[in-house]
Image: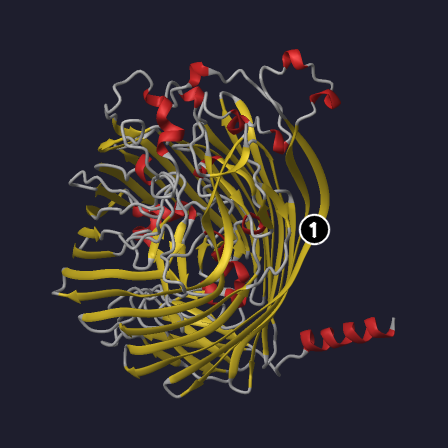
Amino acid sequence: MFKQSLISLSVSAVMLSTSAYAGELKGKVVDNNNLPVSNANVHLHGKSQTIKTDADGNFTIAVDAVSQLHVSKNNFIDQRLDVNPDSPFVTVTLTPSSVESIVVYASALHKSNMEMASPVTVVSGDTLKNSAKPTLGETLKGLPGINASYFGPVSSSPIIRGLDGPRVKITQNGLDSSDASRVGPDHATTNDALGAEQIEILRGPATLLYGAGAIGGVVNVVDNRIPTDVIESPQGAVNYSHDTNSNTNTYAVLFETGHEGFNFHFDGVKRQGDDYETPNFKLPGDHDEHHEDEHGHDDHAHEGEEHEGEEEHAAEYAEKVDNTFIDSEVFNIGTSYVSDHITAGISYGRIETDYGIPAHSHDHGHDHDEHGHEDDHGHDHDEDHGEDDAHDHAGEEHNVFARVKQDRWQALFNYALHNNWLESIQVRAGYTDYEHSEIEGNEVGTVFKNETTELRTNFEHRIGGWHGIFGYHYSDSDYEAQGAEAFTPATNTTTHAFYVLEEKEFGDFTLELGARIEDFELSSRITETHVGHDDDHDEHGHDDDHDHGHEEEMVKTTQVSDYTLEMTNVSASIGGVYNYAPGQNVAISLSRSERAPLTAELLSNGLHIATSTYELGLGYHIEDNEIHFEPTNIEKETSTNLDISFRRFVGDFGYTVNFFYNDISDFYYQEKTNYFFTSEHGLEVADHEHEGARDVYQYVSQDAEFYGLEFDVHYQINDVNRIKVFGDHLRAKLDNGQNLPRIPSNKLGINYAYENGPFKADMTITRYLEQDEITSYETVTKGYTLVDASLSYDFAVQGIDMVGYMNLENLTDELGFVHSSFIKDQAPLPGRNLKLGIRAYF
């Protein structure tokens, strides 16, 4: 009792420790020509609320203690100045920036993209709205260093510098999206770009704030579902667009209002589209010589029956990718109360999406285990899926589609203290209930569920010239999969972490230090099924008259055991930004990050239909054609990453160039074994063919290195014309010299932009280079060139601001294949597309 009272008294003392009085700081924001800058953001560190300058550039903000005032606006360089309750009238001069300068919420230290020690890109505003696609991967893939996994345009996740899945954290307002996109490439992310205010891409390890799942980077989707500013009057937007290629119609609406600090937010998106069209391409199948595709999958084995009855070498072509439709509805509703020192709010979001999964139709007549008939997983046989379904595209009722449902709650509490050293306490909490069902012929085959609870508490402070945060992060995830594709067992994953991130300015140099310690625990129940042969049929009650010539019988035994993996992950970083000239800097970041394997990497044991493989996790061992669970010597994956960035963002000529080197010890990756699997024979050495056989891939760990560069160079020719050159280069290999699989192709592009008053136009030509740095079981992906253009016009109708826009995508109807895709040969990129849209703001 005494200890509790002492703690309560200490907390109260901090909360009530105030400065002598609060004052109001008045000021004005101007540009280099001393002209007022309207609608600039004025923010006092520690408070969640941001105010705007008026038409004359004036502002008034309450100041309670010694703090830092942060003034920012897009296309200007941020300015910061120390203030206190006695500060006189201030004039803040903003210098124009040649690139868009945006505050990065994921940084937690109020940094802009031009001030970060590690490379970051932000996409926002009309640029984001006009280019928004159904998935994050397709929306962002044109950026330097960013690519997409591409399981069709409706299921595509971001790849950052060759890393994706469990190494790239997808967050919504700083909290994990908590979907199943890291379990398989056919699982779409649950983030919609149309509902976002901005999307932030942090390259390189961002594990200090976001945990081990961010060892490759973070994609943070920022929206206003919990308003953090005072909304004084109704405002919003409506949007409609149509894509001709897939006949997709997209509707979006945003509405916000408020009264005396109480705010309300609603946004919703509805998207409905058909299969997408492509340039004419050759389908893989029987007409090809028996070969393996880029992932080592046997095309002859799993697609041969599609062409039964055709001539042996007759090729089949297509001009669309079947089963790539989408039917999606998303809405978010939120409310908040915002005062000078308190921001508190809650939101609820609902997602209901059906989308087709290309190349995911089961191989009817080939291998019934893909219908859930694999006894090893305890599924009942259902022979109704017979030979009539042999052709994968005979009808939509036989294609597999996903039905995603997600309920997501978020809460925010921020308290700005009247204190000279502790600026604020912020708590973010989230609860997500996610379900992904895979459906064929109106029957549910597999259901993936993930129930996640997350809590993040930040304490922002200024002590002895250091500005930073320290905090606590908790996450608990209950994952389960049931059905034909349940190649991973149910698991519970819990993490507790403490972290600290500090910065201090030394003249023109800013030093940044950080560390995180994370307790990781994964627990599951493992079911082992061993298959053996028995020559004595009589012991099992079999009559020799009914043996049909078989000399032996398959005998299966099952063993269930509990398993727990516990690890402590430690991450640390040091970085700095040196502003060696106005509008020019160099940033260096060195980090060391650790992570434990996730469920799929550790415990996979079963057929993964999406990739047409049999997958085994790190915890399994093959001996005498049998699979044994022996999780010994599981090492942490450890990344040592160096980033060096050069930036110039003033004047007519500017650039951002990033060099990176990432050395990863015990890198987890899938290696093709010399085994294959069938439901009839189980696991066998791949020395001869079996109908319906699936190659066996096992997760192993080995040292690897990733290195390369990204660049974005622009030149403002005159007031209305600008040209930009961009590109990236990545090399990824194991220490033994072997190339890693599915590493994205390098790209090089040029963009021309014209802007004159309300009219904007641009054209981008992007060359994706040939990818021939491949593994032994991949094929070379030829290069291709995409030509895209866009036009937009701002106008007003009866006082309502409007934007009309038109995007012309793949103008030359180029045939392109994505090397990072698991279904490269079966799902090329879309052909020519015209997107027409109109947006209204009120």
Residue 536 in the image, given as x and y percentages of width and height: 70, 25
Find residue 579 and report its image quarter. Answer: bottom left
Front residue of this view, candidates 290 and 743: 290
Rendered residue at 41%/19% (across/down): 390
91 shown above or below 840: below
Q: What's the amino acid at mark 1?
A: Tyr
Residue for badge 1: 563
Crowd around label 1: few <14 · some 14–19 · many ≥20 (10 Å): few
Residue 394 in the image, given as x and y percentages of width and height: 37, 18
Find residue 518 and report its image quarter. Answer: bottom right
Residue 461 in the image, given as x and y percentages of width and height: 57, 77
175 shown above or below 11: above
Do we see residue 563 in this rendering?
A: yes
Task: Looking at this view, name the residue that lies furthest to the left.
Answer: 718
Residue 429 in the image, given as x and y percentages of width and height: 61, 55
Rendered residue at 51%/48% (across/down): 698
* Quadrant of the image containing the N terminus: bottom right
Please indicate whether residue 651 sits to the left or right of residue 202 in the image. left
Please indicate whether residue 536 sits to the left or right of residue 779 in the image. right
Rendered residue at 31%/61% (across/down): 730
Front residue of this view, candidates 702 and 127: 702
Find residue 447 and report its image quarter. Answer: top right
Front residue of this view, candidates 757 and 536: 536
